[in-house]
Amino acid sequence: MTVEPTSLVQTASASTNAAALEVGDQVGREVRHGPARLLAVTSLAHFLNDGVVFFIPVIGDLLAQDRHVSTVLITAMLTTFYVTSAGFGIVVGLVADAVGKRGPMLAVGIATLGASLFGFYASLSSAGVSSDVLALLAAAVAGIGSSFYHPLGGSVLQLGFPASSRGRALGINGAFGSLGRALYPALFFVIAAFGISRPATTIVFGSLSILAAVLVAVGLPGDATDLGGRRSGAAEVAAPGAATSVGESDGHLSAPAAGASPGAEAGSPAASLRSILSRSVVALTSIAFFRSLAFIGIVSWIPIYLTTQRHAGVSTGLGVAVTAMYAGGIAGQPLFGLLADRFDKRLVLAVDSLGSAGGIFWFLSTSGHGAEALVALVVFGLFTFSGFPLLLSLVADYVPKSSSTTGNALVWGIGSTGGQALGPLVASLIMGSSEAHLGLAFAILGGVAAATVVATPLLGRTARSSSMAMFG
C-alpha cells in the first residue's frame, strides 16, 4: 500500500496543530476576562504602584527638610528601596510563571506598597536613630511591594493582547502609571492644604493602596495559570512547516526573531531562567539598566535640586514642577506604544533614549522653576517615562509566553529597577558632599542615557519589524 506524501504532511500537520492547541489550552486555561477589563484593572494597579514609587523621592525630600536627615541617609534609603525591588522581582517572576495566580500576586504587591507608607509615616513622626531605622525598613518593604507590578502587569497584557495591539495596550496602561506619578506629588500638597499634617498624608495614600489592592484582587483572574482563553493564551496554528517563535504578527506565528531564545514557542512550558538569557535579552537588560541608572539618578534628586538650587522650596511650586515632569509620560507612553506596534522597536527605543537626554540638557540650560523649565521637564518626562511599552513589547518578542513574567522581571527588575538602585548612589557620588554639583551630575547622567544607543544594534530583529529593520 502506497502512502501519499501529501497525506503524511496533512497527518503530521494535524498532529502538530492538536499538540499546539493542547499546550496552548494548558497555558491559557483561566478565567475568561475580556481585554478591556484586564486593561482597566491593571491600569488601576499601575496608577497606584507608580504613584507610590515616585512619591518616595518626595518623602526623601521631606525627611531632609523636616527631620534634617543627612544626604547619606537619603541615598541609603533610595538605594535600599531600588535594590530590594530589583532583587525580589526575579522571585516574583519565577513564582508567577510556575504557579500562576498573577491577579492575587498583583494585589499582594499593591497592599505591601500601602503598608510601607505607614512605615514612612512612623519615620516622619519620629526623630533621631529610630526615624532613620524606620525609614530604611519602610524603604525595604516598599521595594518588595514595588517588585510585583511590572513583571505581573506586563505579563497580563502580553498574554491578553495579540502582537498587533500589544504595544498600544502597554502604552495605555503605562499612561495610567505616569498619571499616578504626576498626581501623587501634587495631591500631597492638596491633601496637606486641608489641614492634614504632611506626615499624615502618607497614611491617606497608604489607605488608598490597601483599597486598590482589594479591587485588583476582585477584578483580575485567580486561576492557576491566570489568563487568556484561546484569544491570548492558546498557541496559534501556523501553516505546515512554518517556524514558530515568541513574536506574533497579527495573530499568526512568525519566523523566529533574531536573538530569541531557542525553543521559545508560544505556549511552550515555562522555560528555565538560563534558557531565556539569549543575546537579545541580555542586551535589552543591559540597555534598560544603564538607561534607568541615568534616568532615576536624575529623577530621584530632582525634588532636592529644585528645592536647594532652583529655590522652589517644599511648596506648591515644587509639586507643580515634579508633576510637570511626570505628566510628560501620560502622553508619551501611548505614543511610544503605538510607535512600537508600527515601526522597528529598536529604532524607537534609541529615539526615546536620545530624547530623554536632550530633555535634561534643555532643563539644565534654563534657570529657576518658571515656564521654560517646566516645559523642559515635560519633554524630559515624555521620553524618560515611556520605556514601559517599548521594553516589554521587546520582551514579548524575545521570550516564550509561558515565561513572560520571568522575562519581564529580568529586563524590568534586574535591568530597569537594578539601574534605579544605583542611579541615586551614582548621582550622589558625582555631586560629592555638595548639592551645588547636582547639575553636573545630571549632565553626566544625561550623557550616559544617550550612550546606550550604541548597544541597540545588539538587539535582534523582532517579528513585526523584520521587514523594516533599521540596524541590520
Image (cartoon, helix red, strand yellow):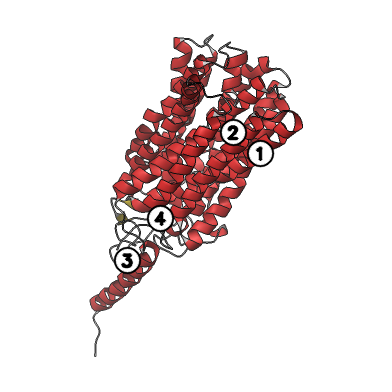
Does residue 43 appear left or right of residue 9 in this picture? right
| Disc assigned to residue 207 | none
Q: Quadrant of the C terminus?
A: top left
Q: Is residue 137 above or below residue 10?
A: above
> In the image, which is nearer the foreground, mark 4 or mark 3?
4
At mark 3, the secondary structure is loop
Neighbor class of circle 3 (other Cα within 10 Å; few <14, some 14-19, many 20+) is few
Mark closest to the chain's N terminus, 1 or 3: 1
At mark 2, the secondary structure is helix
Residue placed at 43% from the left, 35% from the top? 177
Residue placed at 67% from the left, 14% from the top? 436
Alpha carbons under labels 4 and 3: distance apart? 16 Å
Relative to the observer, which residue lies in front, 218 or 82? Answer: 218
> In the image, which is nearer the foreground, mark 1 or mark 4?
1
- Do tag 1 and tag 4 residues touch (Cβ < 8 Å)? no
Alpha carbons under labels 2 and 3: distance apart? 44 Å
Neighbor class of circle 2 (other Cα within 10 Å; few <14, some 14-19, many 20+) is many
> In the image, which is nearer the foreground, mark 2 or mark 3?
2
Q: Quadrant of residue 467?
A: top left
Residue placed at 40% from the left, 40% from the top? 44
- Do tag 1 and tag 2 residues touch (Cβ < 8 Å)? no
Task: Name the kind of residue labelled 2 in the image.
Answer: Leu
- Do tag 4 and tag 3 residues touch (Cβ < 8 Å)? no
- The image shows residue 98 at horizontal and vertical percentages of 50, 62
Provide the residue designation for mark 3.
241
Mark closest to the chain's N terminus, 2 or 3: 3
- Do tag 1 and tag 3 residues touch (Cβ < 8 Å)? no
